[in-house]
Image (tube, grey):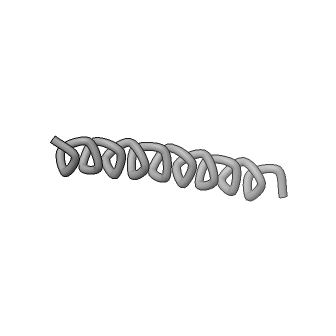
């Protein structure tokens, strides 16, 4: 049980990191368009 919750936490952290980098990339694309 503990192992599964650990894995779940890891997956969620990965998702957060992916979402973070995705929004970063979108923001940069936005800047490029404005320029």
Q: Residue at x 35, y 45 (%)?
A: 27
**How far from the left and from the top, in percent, is residue 31?**
26, 42
**How far from the left and from the top, in percent, is residue 26?**
34, 52
**As drawn, is 1 to the left or to the right of 10?**
right
Q: Residue 15 versus residue 27: which sits nearer the camera?
A: 27
Pick the quarter of the image with the C terminus: top left
Furthest residue in direction front, as rendered: 34
The quarter holding residue 4 reads bottom right
Q: Residue 7 versus residue 22: which sits nearer the camera?
A: 22
Q: Residue 15 versus residue 10: which sits nearer the camera?
A: 15
**How far from the left and from the top, in percent, is residue 22?**
39, 52
Q: Residue at x 65, y 53 (%)?
A: 7
**As drawn, is 18 to the left or to the right of 28?**
right
Residue 35's place in the image compared with 8, above or below, is: above
Pick the quarter of the image with the N terminus: bottom right
Q: Residue at x 54, y 54 (%)?
A: 15
Q: Residue at x 57, y 48 (%)?
A: 16
Count the marks: 0
């Amino acid at each position: 049980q503990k192992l599964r919750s650990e894995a779940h936490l890891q997956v969620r952290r990965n998702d957060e990191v992916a979402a973070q980098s995705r929004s970063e990339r979108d923001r940069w694309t936005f800047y490029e368009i404005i320029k």
